[in-house]
Amino acid sequence: MKNLNTRSVRNVLVAFGTLLMPLLTANAQTGYPQSGDGFYAPDKQFTSSAAYDNQNVRTDSSTYLWTKNGYPVSKEYYNWDNGQIVYSMKGEIVSDTGNEFTYDLTSTSEVDNGTTRMEMSFDNNGDPIKAVTTTTVTGLVYSSEMDYQYWRSNNRIDSIMVTMSNSLTNDKSWAKTIFKTYDSAGRPTRMEHFQDTGDYSIETDAYFTDSSGKLQRIENQEDSYDSYGGNLYWVTKDITYFDSKERMQIDYYYDGNESLTDYSSYSVYHYDQLTGLKSPVLSVPSAIISLSNDWLSVKSSKMETITIYSLSGTVVYTGAKTSGEIQIPVGNLPQSIYIVRGSSGWVKKISK
């Protein structure tokens, strides 16, 4: 029974981490230290998302509820393995006063079921102050708490201290982030993270806009160093792309090595007014692509815009297509791996 409890607790923690990820993404989207960045404006609120591995196999899918001030929580969440659902959750907002809300979810796994209550509070800047979760799994009840403390100057956050406690293990820990530099728009470009274990990391953000100043993508990289000799042991990178309305569209995640030559996973966000899932599958428009000599064939049923990205995130081609098939010349592109994206929501990878 102890093994079952441990596994169930791990499932809840992993899934709850997924639920909390939108806050981190929201912060990255708008520039965390600015006012109200914990919340999304109504026109930036996505209705669903789906995550895929680097073989385009779905691993997670969610639909979302939104609090009064614009904080996302999952209404339905599914974790997939080899095409089968191995873990799922359903959530509801119990109370919501704006800067404080209570959220309940029920979880189902291959082993057993669980319930979790999350209580979150924010300050008037939209930054979290406290997050308390209470979880019950197979008769085991435990709670965890995160408290946030901020140091600000010139309407920017200089540093954040987060203290964490867990009743399951009686562990207490802390983490601190120092914001070192900002760009001219007041967005953070370099941060240093410290943990009580002695590990630390350096995080950098780069923002790319079009000629009109609209945000097109954010490139985030974090280099992690150990506490023994200060050796670099892990590198992660996120590249988030935005549509013409500056809404998150696709987020690519790379990890594990310094070269970061291929993404490990990616997430696609939808804004189609979806309010729930009649089935646990989040459908993504499909396309058939093939590469022959110096031509890329793209066939889909939608009239849409086709964009091709290099692995560094550079747009190497963009063009409109009608419903049906289009031939795109790619003979001028060097041999490499490229990401092909349709504006209707599909994403493919090609190797030239």
Image (tube, grey):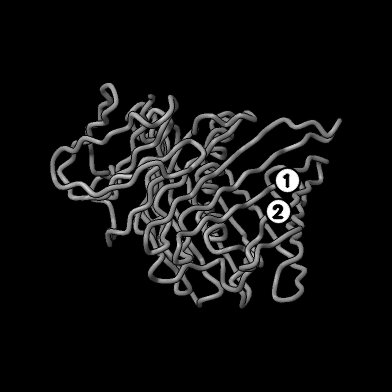
Q: Quadrant of the C terminus?
A: top left
Coordinates of residue 15 in the picture (x, y in percent): 50, 44
Say whether disc 1 or disc 2 marks the residue closer to the N-terminus.
2
Quadrant of res 294: top left
Q: Secondary structure at mark 1?
A: strand
| Residue 202: mark in rendering | 1
Please give left or right for residue 86 compared with residue 199 in the image.
Answer: left
Coordinates of residue 53 in the picture (x, y in percent): 43, 32
**Circles 1, 2 touching at the beta carbon (< 8 Å):** yes
Amino acid beneath label 1: Ile
Q: Pointer 1: residues within 10 angstroms few (<14), some, or many (20+)?
A: some
Q: Is residue 34 above or below residue 286?
A: below
Quadrant of res 120: bottom right
Q: Secondary structure at mark 2?
A: strand
Please give left or right for residue 96 compared with residue 127 in the image.
Answer: left
Q: Which residue is mark 2?
A: 190
Coordinates of residue 125 in the picture (x, y in percent): 62, 75
Q: Is residue 110 visible?
A: no
Q: Residue at x 69, y 49 (%)?
A: 166
Q: Is residue 6 above or below residue 277?
A: above
Q: Is residue 142 visible?
A: yes
Q: Residue at x 26, y 36 (%)?
A: 328
Q: Is residue 196 above or below residue 293?
A: below
Q: Residue at x 44, y 66 (%)?
A: 212
Numbered-mark total: 2
